[in-house]
Image (cartoon, rainbow, N blue to C red):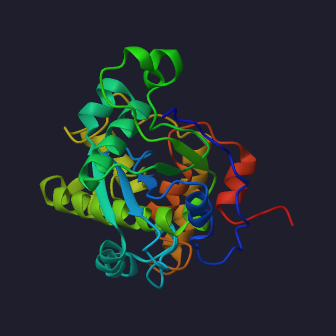
Amino acid sequence: MTATSARASAPSARAGAPSLRVERAYQRAGYRVLAGMDEVGRGALAGPVTVGVVCIDETCRSAPTGVRDSKLLTAARREALVRPVRRWALAWGVGHASPAEIDEIGIMRALRLAGRRALAACGIVPDLVILDGNHDWLTDPAEVGLLALTAAADPPPPVRTRIKADLSCSSVAAASVLAKVERDALMVRHAPAFPAYQWEINKGYAAPGHRAALAALGPCELHRRSWNLTGPLSLGEGVAAGVAAGVAAGPAEGPGGSPDEVAESLSDGTPVMVHDVLQEVGFDGR
């Protein structure tokens, strides 16, 4: 099968809970087993990039109550959803790519590596992957078209990208919850060995306390050393830091997410347009 992608319009920021409407449409088109996929940690300065996968088929009914994009949930609510999501899914998996791997092969290939590991952990091969976003980082270009004739491995499942799929597709939202909970727990476990970086709070993102510790102490072995760890903030990082500061001044975790989750949404290490930033903070131009 040839991997392809199809962009879909992003749902409104005011959209309700995700559903299986998109998944059911793909199943009616012949893709019986679907894998919703989402990543967390792309823009962090330390720790892995993590990918979650939730596989469903036609026997999987509505997702557990409360499933949402992980950034819209408190940490306690995410953790409470893990067991119900695992019971609901036909199969699930979480994969990581380490900071050393990110430094060696770059973030996009590291995303692919983590995604392939998450799929392998599922123990089944889906007929189609629904990938959050507008770029198919899961498919290796060498496995597409004429180049695929020389590939030794089995071809990957086809991919359909969907902007804000974590807001509209239950399987993708559920995958985001599994990935976020596992990566956060990993960073909290690492925090006591490196207390100055405050990973138990910022989960490795570019929070002011984390950057101050980097400036004073330099990076440790869990930092992405090929990244600009102490230099000027990019546009996306700057807005994320500003919004995170505003969130931190309010409740510890509210409907908009904690400071590290705002950074997850905005500071992904890629170029950010002002329009995209405004959408992320809830302004839709109306």
Q: Residue 102 or 166: which is nearer the viewer? A: 166
Residue 20 spot, x, y in % from top left: 56, 71
Residue situated furthest right in the rendering? 286
Residue drawn at (48%, 36%) of the image: 137
Residue 35, picture quadrant: bottom left
Residue 156 rendering spot, x and y as whole percentages:
40, 36
262 relative to 48 in the view: left or right: right
Q: Quadrant of residue 54?
A: bottom left
Question: How far from the left and from the top, in percent, is residue 14?
Answer: 71, 74
Judge by depth and name the residue closer to the eye, 69 or 262. Answer: 69
Q: Which quadrant: the C terminus?
A: bottom right
User: Which residue extends farthest left?
Assistant: 193
Query: In terms of depth relative to the viewer, which is nearer, 240 or 89?
Result: 89
Q: Is residue 157 above or below residue 167?
A: above
In the image: residue 89, left or right of residue 283:
left
Image quadrant assignment for residue 25: bottom right
**Is residue 153 shown above or below 217?**
above
**Residue at 50% across, 41% down:** 158
Seen at 47% across and 79% down, the residue is 61
Is 51 on the left-hand or right-hand side of 14? Answer: left
Residue 150 percent across, percent down from the top left: 38, 14
Q: Residue at x 73, y 54 (%)?
A: 9
